[in-house]
Image: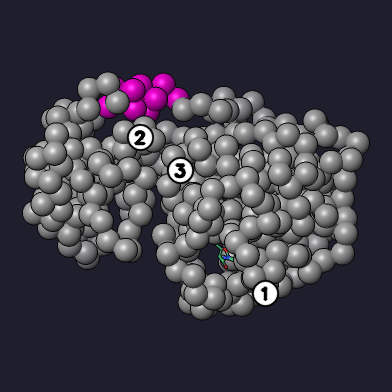
Amino acid sequence: MSTSDEAFPRGAFAREDENEDRRFYGADRFVSHLDATALATVERIVGALVTEPEPAVLDLMASWDSHLPSSLRAGRVVGLGLNERELAANPALNGRVIHNLNREPRLPFADAIFDAALCTVSVDYLTRPVEVFAEVARVLRPGGLFLVIFSNRFFPPKVVRIWREAGEDQRVRLVEKYFARSGGFTAPRLYVSQGRPRPADDRYAGLGIPSDPVYALFADRLGGPRETTRELPESLQKHHGEAPEEPRARRRWVAETECCPHCGERLTRWRVPQTPFTQWSSEVQLVCFNDACPYYEGGWRAFARQGNPGSYRFMYDPDSNTYHPMPVPTPTAYRDGIEAAEERS
Ligand SMILES: C[S@@+](CC[C@H](N)C(=O)[O-])C[C@H]1O[C@@H](n2cnc3c(N)ncnc32)[C@H](O)[C@@H]1O
């Protein structure tokens, strides 16, 4: 069974790698899944929303960092995940549980024992999300917080198809739907931080991309006395719900002109390769194949600093109105897709 819910298209929760998740996550990944600016934002959100004294916290799909700010004096903190060594290295935890939510969405905890549950940059791997959200509601006390944070990076083989094919706005709608269909929560509220500058010492700083976006959706378990009192401070709220002017204007400009925002050259229609191993949201993407583009040129230098060959080209998806870096191993890579697309148009 992929999900108990019929509100999603058939195959929505299929994944490229359907092998046992413990095999994939058995390999240690002591990495940061977001850049330092985004991680600091995550900590501030957690600190602002978890307001109970000495809260009992469930860190769902946990690894070596629970993103609790040092100001948060938590009582019990239980991490549930799939990698023993990552959980053992997590200093915030005083309880650790290995449990595969895709095999068994039922949580191994009694009813109403947690004040807050966090799920950071992991909701995209759930194949039975509505059941898991309902279980989170069960283990939270009435009024308890469920905070789901995500960005736009993921491990492609393990992410569910509906997430992979969605644009960022659609992913927000999807998580809202998980909350709603679980039946256990107040209407979730959204906070978005995007377009902040990437830290100068970040390994991708040379690519000209901003800090990783942070999407936070949060709701209270139904039945609590304080359903509307969790608030983010003003300093966080000013990014609430919408992109700052520069990236939003840039996206509009790209959509209207179909030109690369880095070099101004017209984007090329590029037909995506059809293989059994790749999935694309649309068959044609718009790509900057200008070899003098500063984004592409900077990519070679950034890759070289990491000891890797290759670069990125700017790629725009007109269907979802989103853009992404397209990794290219050589200057001629993927150019065959250009002719195929141009011939058809
Ligand atoms: C991208 S990492 C995020 C880790 C952590 N939440 C963080 O913010 O750094 C995804 C995590 O989800 C966990 N995970 C993936 N699939 C899972 C599953 N089926 N059941 C439980 N945990 C899972 C993995 O162990 C992994 O640590």
Magenta portion: prevailing SS class: helix
Q: Residue placed at 44% from the left, 61% from the top?
A: 155
Neighbour tally class for label 3: few under 14, some 14-19, many 20 plus, Cα within 10 Å: some
Nearest the eye: 151 or 306: 151
Query: Residue 166 has which mark?
Result: 3
* Residue 276 versus residue 298 in the image, above or below: below
Counting residues from the start of the chain, the first of labels 3 and 2 encountered is 3
Q: In which quarter of the view is residue 125 placed?
A: bottom right
Q: Position of residue 31 (x, y in %)?
A: 46, 64
Nearest the eye: 273 or 25: 273
Q: Position of residue 320 (x, y in %)?
A: 39, 35
Q: Which residue is mark 2?
A: 319
Q: Which residue is mark 1?
A: 98
* Residue 84 versus residue 50 in the image, above or below: below
Query: With 72 as the anchor, is 271 left or right in this view?
Result: left
Distance Cα–Cα, label 3 vs label 2: 10 Å
